[in-house]
Image: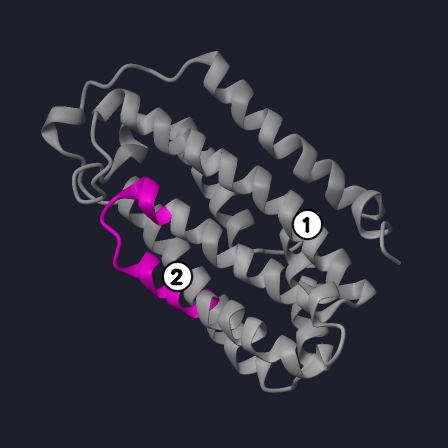
Amino acid sequence: ISPMLTPHPHLLLYPFMILAMWGILMTSSICLRQVDLKALIAYSSVSHMGLVAAAILTQTPWGLTGAMTLMIAHGLTSSALFSLANTNYERTHTRTLLLIRGLQLAMPLMSTWWLLICLTNMALPPSINLIGELLIITTLFNWSSFTIILTGIGTLITASYTLYMFLMTQRGAISTQFRLLSPTQTREHLLMMLHLLPLGLLIMKPSLITGLFT
C-alpha cells in the first residue's frame, strides 16, 4: 500500500490504520459470541492479522520485525489450534462448544496440549507471540499514543476468548455420549510436538526472525 501513497503517505495511512485497529476489536468481540469451535479459531486468526496489518503500515523496522514475528508465531499457534479442534471433531463429530465440554476427563493428555497452545495464543511469557505483540504495540504507541487503548482492549478480549475456548472444551461435566471416546494416537501427539518445538526453539533464539529488519 505504501508505494501508492507516496504523495502524502502519513495522512493517507490513517484510514487503513483505523480499519486495521477497528478490525482487531470487532473480530475479537465476535470470538466471544461464537458457538462453533473452528469459527472461533478462524476469527482469532483474523484478529491477530489486524495487528500485523497495522504494524506493516507503520513502515518502521520495529513494526516490520513485530509483524514478521507474529505472523510466524501465530501461524504455528493457529495451525495447532485447528489440529486440536479436528482431533475433537474426529471423535465427537460436532464443533459446538456446548456439546464438547469436559473432554479433559476423556483425553487428559490432549488437554495438556490445549492448555499450552491456549497460553501461547494469549501471548503469555516467554512465548515468541509475546515478543511480536510487544514490538507491534510499542511501534503503534510511537505512531500514535491513542492506539494503546485499542491494543490494550484487544489484548484483554484475546485473553478472554482464549480462556473461554479452553474452559468450554476441557472443563465442566462431560456429555454421556462422549464418555467412551477412542484414545489419542501417537501421530496426534507428534503433530502437536512439531508445532510447539519450533515455538520453543524461537524462544531460545528469537534473533532468527527478529533480526531480519533491524
- Image height of 207 relative to 136, above or below: above
Return the x and y of residue 43 as percentages of the image width and height: 39, 52
Return the x and y of residue 126 as percentages of the image width and height: 67, 52
- Graded by Cα atoms within 10 Å as few (under 14), some (14 to 19) or many (20 or more), the crowding at tag 1 reads many
Label at residue 27: 2
Residue in the image at 58% along x and 38% along y:
76
Return the x and y of residue 37 as percentages of the image width and height: 30, 42
Return the x and y of residue 100 as percentages of the image width and height: 22, 36
Label at residue 128: 1
> Residue 174 is drawn in which quadrant?
top left
Look at discs 2 and 1 and give the one toward the viewer: 2
Answer with left or right where residue 157 lies relative to residue 199.
Answer: left
What residue type is disc 2 on?
Thr
Is 39 magenta? The answer is yes
Q: Earlier in the sequence, mark 2 or mark 1?
A: 2
- Image height of 157 relative to 31, above or below: below
> Residue 2 is drawn in which quadrant?
bottom right
Q: Which residues are magenta?
A: 24-40
Front-most of 25 and 11?
Answer: 11
